[in-house]
Each structure stands twice: as C-alpha cells, then as structure tokens.
Image (cartoon, coloured by chain):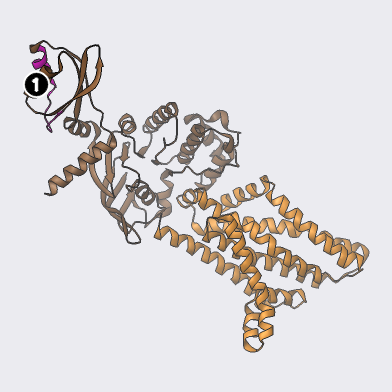
Chain colours: A orange, B brown
Amino acid sequence: MYAVLKSELKSYFNSTFAYVVTGFFSFVASVYFFMGNIYNQSLNLSSLFSTMSIILLFIVPVLTSRSIAEDRKNGMEVLLITSPVSLSGIIIGKYLAVLSVFLVMTAITFIYPVILFIFSRPAVIPLAGEYLGFVLLGAAMISFGVFISSLTENQVAASIISFVCLLIMMIIQPLGNSVGGDVSKALNWFSIFSRYDDLNRGILGVDTIIYYLSFVFVFLFLTIRVIEKRRWSRG
Amino acid sequence: MIEIQKVTKYYGKMKALNNLNFKVAKGEILGFLGPNGAGKSTTMNIITGYTPSTEGTVKVCGLDILEKPREVKKHIGYLPEHNPLYTNMTVMEFLGFICELKLVEKKQIKNHLIHIMEQVDVADAGNRLIKNLSRGYRQRVGIAQSLVGSPEVLILDEPTVGLDPKQMIETRELIKNLGKEHTILFSSHILSEVKAVCDRVVIINRGEIIAAGNLDQLSRKLRNGSGLRVAIAGPGDKIEKIIWGVEGVCSVEADDSRDNGAVSYVIKSGRDIDVRESLCFALVKAGYPILELQFLDMSLEDIFIQLVSDEKEVNR
C-alpha cells in the first residue's frame, strides 16, 4: 500500500497535472473569498465552502479518472496484481494518493481563515466543522471517482461519467424537495450534498460522519470487487 | 518448480485452455511455443496468479497459487506481454517502486538495484526517463523488473517481440545467462529463438498441448518428414529419374533457378526415412555431383500443420 501511495503521489506531483488542478482550485476559491468575505466584510465562510464544493464537482473527476483506468490501459494492473501486495492495499494506496492531493488543496485554503483572524475574531468551532464537512465530502466524492475509474480504461470517459453522476447526486436533493413527502426525505438522507449542507450550517452529527465514512468504504469495496470480477471473467 | 495439472480455463463459454499438464524442473529453461491466440499468455497469467483457472491446480515451489497467492507471488518474477512500465519515471525510480512492491528490504534496495541493472546491462540509463529509452532498453528494464526480489521462477511472455535482430540476440543471451540462477518459462512464436535458448519445449495450439519434449528430438523427428533442397549439376530429366529411383522419395520438384549449370530440387521423403545417404551415392554413381544440400527449415506454421495432421491421423 505504501509503495503504491508513494509512486502515485510522485506521478501526480512530478507532472504539471496536480499543480494545474490545485492552481485552478485556489484561483476560483480565492476570487470567491475576495468577493464574498473581503469585499463584503463578512466573517461567514459557509457560502465560500458551498462554492468550493461545487468546484470539487469539476475537480474530483479530473483527479480520479486516471487512478485505475490508466494502469489498466498500460498493463501495469497485471504487474500490481501479480506482486505480493493485496488488492485492497493497492486500491487504498491509490485512493489515499488522490486524497492527499485534495488535502493539499484544502490546506492552501487555510489562508482564508488566517486572513480573517488577522482582522477579526471569527468563531473557531463552526469553522472547524466547515472544514471537517468539506474534507469528508471530498473524501466521499473521490471514492466515487476511483470507483468509476475502475469501470473503464478510458480516462476521458471515466471523468465524464463521474462528473455526470456527481452532478446527479447534487441535483437529486432539490429535485426530491420539489416532489416532497417521503421521497424527498429519502433522497435527502442519501444525498452526499444535503449532508454537507447540514455540516456547513454547523450541525455536526455522528451519523453524518459515519455516513461519509461508510460511503467511502462502500465505494472502495465496490472498486475492489469490480477488479476481482474482471480477473475471474477474463484476462 | 512449476507444476500444472489439468488446467482448464473458460472465458465465458469459450474454452481457452483445455486440460493442460506440464512441469518445469528446477533450473530448466522451458520454451513455450505456440501461434498467437494459442493460450500462452493465458497460461502465464494463470501461473502468476493474475487470472484464476476454471479447473485444475497450479503449483509453484510446491505452493498452490489459489491457496497461498501471496507466498507464491514472492517466488515469481513476471514480464507480461506488453511490458508495463511507468514511462514518466526514471529507470531507477521505476525499479525502486517495484522493489517496494515486491517487499525488498529497504536497506538492501540500493545494492539489489545496482546488481540487477548490471545484470541486464541498463546501469548507464539509470537516471533516464523510461519514455526516452529505446525499445531494446525498455525491454531490458522489463526484464530487470522481473528480477526484482530475486525470484526463483521467471516467467517471460514473448520477451523479444518488437526488437531488432541484434537486440533479439542480446536478449536471448541474457535469458540464457539468467537460466543459470533461475527457473525460466519463456514463451515465443519464433522457433529458432526457442531453439537457441531452451532445453525443452512445450508446443501449444488452441489451448491444448500438441507436443512436448527435448527440442533436438522433436525437431529431428519432424525434420525427417520434411524436405531437402539439393543443388545438382547435370541434365534435368536424367537427374530427376535418378532421384525418383532412390528409395523413400515421395516427391521431387525442380526449382527454376539455375546457378552455374546446377538445378535445385526440393525433395520430400517419407516420415522417419533419411534419404541423404542413398541419394548421394546414387547421384555420384551416375556422375552428377551434389553441390549443395540443406534441410528445409520448418517454420512454426509447418510444424503446426504437421503436428495437427499427425494428431488427426492418430485419432483415426
């Protein structure tokens, strides 16, 4: 697992790829921070986090699409599977690599609260909650992207499919709300974004954390199953 | 070292391997011959634990690949057909990654890599990016990769495909040398290559073994049934008559090419009959010297046709 994580991180940061994505993210987030917080003199970062979660919708598919699809295409998968490392170790290594890139991106945004602290005294606990929610949401989206990446060897297809699916996950919540009743309740319970809204509003429930962690677990588990199944059915 | 028993593999409904049985002894270089699509790569994928077999058992170093996959994988170095490499890494980085993957102890990695890179002769390219390397170098990096962790068994899937003739010869030499320390199963569809490297061959077609054994015996046996090309100086019609007079000759065909008054004939004889001696005596007696005599080299296709037709005869 450690070997895979290390080599994946190397390949992200040895290419311009991670830098371009991180730069794009930081740029858009900073523009919103400037407009929403500096210009409006607001201490409330929750709208910034909502915006960043929408940016994630574009960034996560790009980050995750290569993780498994590429190895399958260039045959590295054969080498990984025939090495004395467990399949789950390989997948978790790959997942953690993407997660690390995401965490680096998140770490850059620490500069916004620092700026706020220079000028004022924002409440710390809601801020921590917002960050926790953002990281959990990112972690969940990445696990989904990795899963989609395992389904195809075409990276472009992988990123488009994950984008569309994540988009659907985002819009089922307003969609469900317009239907109303139990449907809306059920969809809200399942939606990774409505959970995020709760966190962003400062409602931190244990069930929410467990929800996100199990989301990650389920999709990583499915990824492993997909690869296992492929091994059994064809070469 | 490698024991394959009754291995059958289905891809959906398609039978890719049918009841495969063979063994590779310790220290042996076994050639695995077959045309494309015969099931060579499938067999190798099963031995290395990439794909499981539908039926049958595979044992490497006495351990079953399905029961103790991780243990078995430690004993195997595998060069898959398409030679997977991370082209954005340098040779050193890539091999270092493989070392970690194969659980080589941290302290030993450096010395181990130096040793391997010298063995396959890529030491001078250690800091170059793999994407900038020539095909021959890449292939050697691939072989280096399979050597990481000093596995007892090496499985090389068509290691010489796409190389130029010089690189092919070098790669064969390399494999031969590696055979001194490792047990090697090596696949190819080039007969001469297998001849140059291996002690023993297994020939496979459509998922079934059609011949196995010592290569010399096998090719001698096959060669007898094939042809001779003989260049003889003298008048065509008379010579043809003499050749027909030799016992065992099945067909004579004159070649159109004339070289210094000599005509080439392609002579085919019955199986297990060597006509060379009697042919020579007959012609010399008549006063027509043989200027050239050579076996027609059988291509792999010829061998297949012959083996497959033999099989049909046996079945009848």
Q: Residue A192: x, y in percent?
A: 66, 73
Q: Is residue B134 magenta?
A: no
Residue pointed to by mark 1: B241
- Return the residue nearer the eye: A62 or B20: A62
The correct choice, above or below, for A41 with respect to B292 in the image is below
Give the residue displayed 46% in from the left and 50% down from the top: A78
Q: Residue A108: x, y in percent?
A: 78, 57
Disc 1 packing (10 Å; few <14; some 14–19; many ≥20): few
Evaluate whether residue B33 shows in this view.
yes
Q: Residue B40: x, y in percent?
A: 34, 46
Residue A96 falls in image quadrant: bottom right
Residue A197 falls in image quadrant: bottom right
Kind of residue indicated by mark 1? Lys
The correct choice, above or below, for A163 with respect to B184 in the image is below
Give the residue displayed 83% in from the left and 64% down from the top: A32
- Return the residue nearer the eye: B242 or A226: B242
Give the residue displayed 25% in from the left and 11% down from the top: B260
- Return the residue nearer the eye: A50 or B205: B205
The correct choice, above or below, for A232 with respect to B38 in the image is below
Q: Quadrant of the N terminus of chain B?
A: top left
Give the residue displayed 73% in from the left and 54% down from the top: A22
Task: Report the side of A32 relative to B119 (left or right).
Answer: right
Label 1 resides on the chain identified as B
Q: How many marks?
A: 1
Task: Report the side of A71 relative to B298 (left or right).
Answer: right
Q: Residue A12: x, y in percent?
A: 65, 49
- Span highlighted in magenta in the image: B268-284
Task: Report the side of B172 relative to B87 (left or right).
Answer: left
Residue B174 falls in image quadrant: top left
